[in-house]
Image: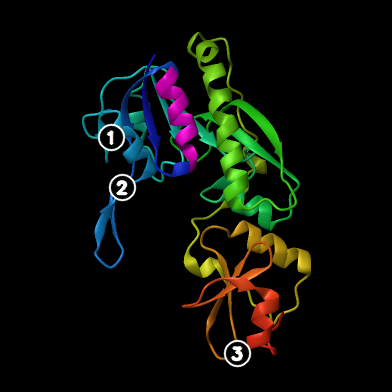
Amino acid sequence: MKIVFFGTPDYVLPILEKLYKYHEVIAVVTQSPKKSGRGQKLTYSPVDNFTHKRKIPIFFDFVNLPNADLGVCAAYGQIVPPYVISHMLYGILNVHPSLLPKYRGASPVQAVIANGDIQTGVTIIKMDEKVDHGPIVTQFKEEILPNDTTETLRARLFERSAQVLIDLIPNYSKGKINPKSQDHEKATYTKVLKKEDGFIDLTVHCSLITVHNFIRAMYPWPCAWTRLSDGKRLKLLPNDMVQLEGKNPVSKRQFKLTYPSSVF
């Protein structure tokens, strides 16, 4: 089957790898390279690097995409317009890391951890013109472990999604799966996170479990942080580690030796 893949970050690579192994990936649409670092060098996305090495055509927009049987989207980072969806014979399957209709939007994994949920999952939908709105093709559940961070949970979800997707494509393309409409009245939403969203005010009373969940949810990005009485920024890392701006990470115990009056 001829497939166009839409995706950008490293954690969706298991899906692209499976598609490349079992199908004909004729094009990949990913975010364009960004300038970063002091030298302002162009940094290409992990999906871009994978694709380039295999000489698959890479697109940074939707112009002149080739005809394909199916599109697969996983954490692409942009809204795919309706004319692109209709460009695919069987539409586009979107892999979303939550049990839709709960936690639509850009940060579902962060949301489930921050909220203290004990279970999440992945929903594969047939994409329509609205964000995470299309009918459900399949879902699976996954336990959230006590020390899961966004990084570990998200990696596990997409790793498992890869095989689920490969297994369903044959029956889906043959019309043997009837997508089921979501209960839109039960939809909840998450937002695109910014660095500022990692802030937590530890001078305001909040339970240890709330702080623990927030730190796990914000790792590895934007990373939980707070401000000390002298105005310096302090990162709060998993496993009881902290990092003062401009310094290396240390344990909370070590940090208390330097800042005995800190809130820890």
| Contact (Cβ within 8 Å) of mark 1 with mark 3 | no
Give amino acid for label 2: Tyr
Q: Residue beneath label 2, please?
A: 44
Looking at marks 2 and 3 on the same chain, the residue that comes earlier in the sequence is marked by: 2
Residue identifier under label 1: 52
x, y percent for residue 234: 56, 77
Magenta stretch, residue numbers: 11-21
Marks 1 and 2: CB-CB under 8 Å?
yes
Q: Is residue 219 magenta?
A: no
Dot 3 surroundings within 10 Å: few (below 14), some, or many (20 or more)?
few
Was residue 13 drawn as part of the magenta stretch in this picture? yes
Location of residue 212 by image quarter: bottom right
| Mark 2 Cα-neighbour bin, 10 Å: few <14, some 14–19, many ≥20 | some
Q: Report, in whole angstroms, how far the alpha carbon at label 1 lies from the one at label 2.
A: 10 Å
For this rendering, which residue is in front, 83 or 145? 145
Q: Quadrant of the C terminus?
A: bottom right
Label 1 is placed on what type of residue? His
Q: Is residue 35 above or below residue 243?
A: above
Residue type for callout 3: Ser
Pointer 3: what residue?
229
The residue carrying pointer 1 sits among few (fewer than 14), some (14 to 19) or many (20 or more) residues within 10 Å by Cα, namely few
